[in-house]
Amino acid sequence: MMNAAAVSSVPNVPRRHTRRQIIPDAVLGMSFFVACELMFFAALISAQFVVRGSAGEWPPPGQPRLPLLTTAGNTLVLLASGVLLWLAARSMRDAKPAAATAKLLRWSVWLGSLFVAVQGMEWMRLIHFGLTLQSSSYGSFFYLIIGAHGLHAVAALVLMMHVYHTFAGGTLRVTRFWAAQVFWYFVVGLWPFLYVLVYLT
Amino acid sequence: MNPSSVTAPAHQADAHAHHEPQGFFSKYLFSCDHKVIALQYTLTGMFMAVVGVYMSYVFRMHLANPTAHIPFYGVLSPAAYNSLVTNHGTIMIFWVAMPVLLAGLGNYCIPLMIGCDDMVFPRVNRLSFQIFFLSTVLLLLGFIAPGGAFGGAWTSYPPLSAKADYNMTPWGNKIWLLAVALEIVAFLLGGINFITTAMNSRAKGMKMFDMPVLVWMIVIATIIFMMSVGPLVAGAVMLLLDQTVGTHFFGAQGGDPVLWQHLFWFFGHPEVYVLLLPELGVVCEIICVFSRKPLFGYKTMVYTTFMVGILSMVVWAHHQFVAGIDPRMASIFSLTTIIISIPVAVIMFGMIATMFKGSIDFKVPMLWAVGIIVEFLLGGVTGIYLGSSALDVYFHDTYFVVAHFHYTLIPLVAFGGFAIFTYYFPKVTGKMLDERLGQIHFWGTAIAFNFVFIPLFFSGLAGEHRRIYDYSGFAELATPGMLKMRVIATHALLVMMAFQLPFIWNVLKSLFAGAPAGANPWKANTLEWAADSPPPHGNWPELPEVHRGPYEYSVPGREDDYWPQNAAN
């Protein structure tokens, strides 16, 4: 935990009483943001269920089916990325050599990027088969929900790269790492639910 | 952790002061100081209030005399009428109430009331205002876009709002939606700051239940906002895709128009409580100070407020009783809607009990605070009629609804805004406002306000529908009796507007020639009155320490009838 002097000498960081924080600022702020995001995704999913409830057949006849197996494999890739980040956090906590932590972080980012890349390729194939935003409300919801998750994944990856670079440069503030961790766990942890609710049911 | 922390401990006490921006632009336009950001929000909100009032002036003048040439506007066309009605609602909720009551008040008061220098994330705070400002400009640009500003009502129901073929504003509908979405993002960033700051930055010795109830209420309002806003953003993205890409979320082919209403009102109704709670917090503060009594049932108030927050999330479908929802669902939502009046009533009774046997001093802020209680009560009571699904089938979309929500929102936003303004003006500027002009302003505004909206209750009961440009096509609504109601309301609006002149004169006069206020003109306990007026950059020479709760007024055996939170004894 930083002391008062450390806080006040950083530009634009407020001077304040240094009470023991149960949850550090960055983590608390990020958690509320994630709570808000969860409501966003809950709304998208429930909207899909409302429309699906009044549709006769789901997926509608004549629309391409979603790639279940590839995506199942891709799910494992994303989960592995989350596990690697958890290992990186442990290695950082136990003050292991920086090179080991950096390696775990790097692999976590790479697996995350692989997930996004595979998703992109699957999209290209689906569009080729005729599933588009306009083709049906099935397509609209698929691209909306999965696309929203994809955008969050990309944003989280950018954040993780920032974390990696500041870690490599030795200027990473640990609370900031924790906040990035919260966001990546949100992206990773949300995905299996989306896989079940959009792909499987 | 930061390298500079190792090298700079020698001048730690004044390290922050070194970062005080000097130039005009860095000090007033790009500042990270919470007080400057609060003023930016408040002044932008007040400017938009003028815009919103001007719009209501134009369409009320038109309704009173449909063919006339309106001074300062001209003749109102049907499309322009729709645009004005839509944007009046949008502006008053999103660009006046939110920035003034939540962002302005919260930014100013939270750090000062809990005794820290600034928000936890000052740069996020600055970004919040910048996005808000961008959204303001965007919304106003809608009026010069080809086809004019969006005219599909502030609730923006599809299919009308989803297709330019229907709403005839190909640019306006997208601009409106984007502006609202940006504005929401701005408050999201601000909200993260509010909660984190209140949790982690409190002064030494200040426990959660030593926070003024205002801070509690702002925090709870922010939590409600953050829990309800996600669905609106989701709905806005879907509607924007419907408008631009041609998806089928809310359209007739495979989509569901009522789905938008659920997403919109899931946010839209909690939003009412987001606006209500900070206001009730201010009323609590003002009533304690001007009655010289502790707040009645502080903890009960806080728990009750949590109850309001939870219930506010499960009342939304009472806006959709005529939208074809399941009647069983309608009765559940009737029930929750009527139940939520219980915790709100508890808070109101708490305020009245605070005044009971107090030595009440009717200074101007106190007048506004008591005005809120009286007028808001009327708004709340008429809400019970509308919450009952059987009655709402008749009242829905009539002027009864219009009068009802103006009776809740004008006490909150206008009265509440003036209460905040007159209460904190000495703190913000260091000058006192003129009492006499303030009293004239209060009585003129409050009386005229009732004459605007009481006639509308009656025309609503007589069946007058809202959002209609020309009543001459409806024989039963075009009678001289109905017209008379509209004329009374319009004249009262003009009187109400005229009574804002003493206020403007008061502000200008006091800014230049007001009596100096000193740090604590109201003899209040809370920490913001321990700082200088106006508080300097960094707020405190030394961080304050808190020894007691915020409402220690008239403590027996003490010479002063107040006991500041930071006073050692």
Image: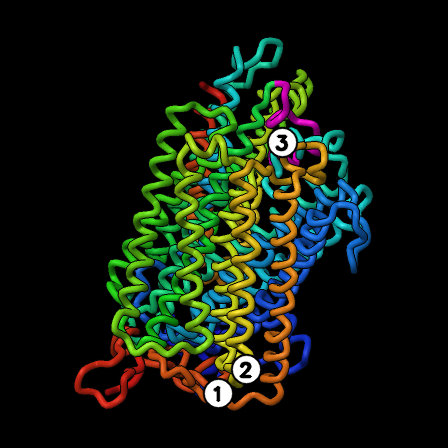
Q: Which residue is mark 1?
A: B517
Residue at mark 1 shares a chain with residue at mark 2 = yes
Chain that bears disc 3: B
Tell me whether the residue at label 1 lies in contact with that at label 2, contact meaning CB atoms closer than 8 angstroms.
Answer: yes
Query: Is residue B223 or residue A95 the one in the foreground?
Result: B223
Res. B429 mark? 2
Q: Which amino acid, by three-letter code, is at mark 2?
A: Thr
State which quarter of the image contains the C terminus of chain B. bottom left
Considering the numbered disc 3 on the image, is that residue within a helix, a strand or a loop? loop
Q: Could you tell me how far apart the alpha carbons at marks 3 and 2 are, in whole angstroms?
A: 46 Å
Query: Is residue B94 or residue B478 the one in the foreground?
Result: B478
Question: Residue A1 at what x, y percent from top left?
Answer: 35, 67
Chain that bears disc 2: B
Question: Residue B67 at what x, y percent from top left?
Answer: 79, 46
Q: Is residue A148 above or below residue B48?
A: above
Instruction: Using the rendered image of the protein, determine whether residue A174 is visible from the camera's viewpoint.
Output: no
As drawn, is B475 to the left or to the right of B4? Answer: right
Q: Could you tell me how far apart the alpha carbons at marks 1 and 2 are, in whole angstroms?
A: 9 Å
Q: Residue at x 44, y 62 (%)?
A: B372
Identify the residue at the far left of this view.
B557
Q: Which amino acid, by three-letter code, is at mark 3?
A: Pro
Magenta stretch, residue numbers = B237-253
Q: Which residue is mark 3?
A: B158
Q: Which amino acid, by three-letter code, is at mark 1?
A: Ala
Q: Mark 2 packing: few (<14 Cα in 10 Å), some, or many (20+)?
A: some
